[in-house]
Amino acid sequence: EDQVTQSPEALRLQEGESSSLNCSYTVSGLRGLFWYRQDPGKGPEFLFTLYSAGEEKEKERLKATLTKKESFLHITAPKPEDSATYLCAVQPNDGGYQKVTFGTGTKLQVIP
Amino acid sequence: NAGVTQTPKFQVLKTGQSMTLQCAQDMNHEYMSWYRQDPGMGLRLIHYSVGAGITDQGEVPNGYNVSRSTTEDFPLRLLSAAPSQTSVYFCASSYSRTGNYGYTFGSGTRLTVV
């Protein structure tokens, strides 16, 4: 069974204080690992897809990296508007469209 | 704006009542799904569709029905509401079977069953 564990559950940062969120996963064979951002009262918003170990993707202050067992979402010099819950999800090679397993998320709060 | 539209945003039901959560997308996506999100749990798949006329069960299908008569619409029906169905429901759609471009989610329906 595919599993996704995100840590920490919650993270509080001062504005400008860089940090990383962790997503550990177990999957029979990885087709893709996804990062989403979810604001309160809204649906998740797609950020990145990573496919293979060593791959990196960036968007503004966010950089996602992937190893064979985990992914990191690095947040550089965060701003208050980066406050949100960040979700990680994995899709296995042997699954169809629907076989995506989501983690429970990391709630990030950036304080001015 | 193009995207996934869910209605209603909020709903309170009494135990035993039925209702339909509406979901519509205007991106011509073939793939659509319904998820529920509960505190401390990841998004869990209820039902999904890979095209008009084709639906299948996800992880937690009991108590819910779906149909997909058009590409655009994918309603979720609660047959006889129970307090355990209190949750936030999200509809999602995707262009790609492999999710290369991720899912586009609606803004959710917060359902309370009393």
Image: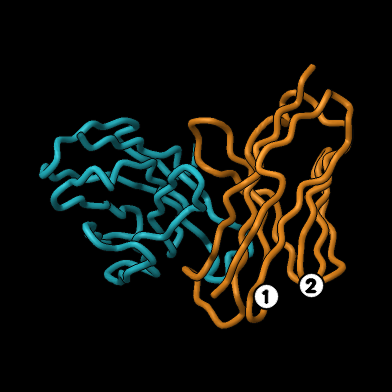
Chain colours: A orange, B cyan
Find out whether the residues at labels 1 and 2 contact each other: C-beta distance under 8 Å.
no
Q: Which chain does the numbered disc 2 sit on? A: A
Work out how far the residue at label 1 is from the one at label 2, CA to CA, in angstroms.
9 Å
* Image position, residue B35 (x, y; %): 41, 53
- Point out the residue furthest to the top here: A112
Quadrant of the rendered image containing residue B22: top left
Indicate whether A28 appears above or below A34: below
- In the displayed structure, A64 sits above or below A62; it is below
Q: Which percent across, then down, holds residue B4? A: 43, 45
Instruction: Locate residue A3 relative to residue B37 in the image: left or right.
Output: right
Q: Earlier in the sequence, mark 1 or mark 2?
A: 1
Q: Which residue is mark 2?
A: A68
Q: Residue furthest left?
A: B16
Mark number displayed over residue A30:
1
Q: Nearer the viewer, residue B84 or B36?
A: B84
- Residue at image location 56% in from the left, 83% down from the top: A94
Q: Amino acid at mark 1?
A: Leu
Report the number of numbered marks: 2
Name the subunit of mark 1. Answer: A
Is disc 2 on the same chain as disc 1?
yes
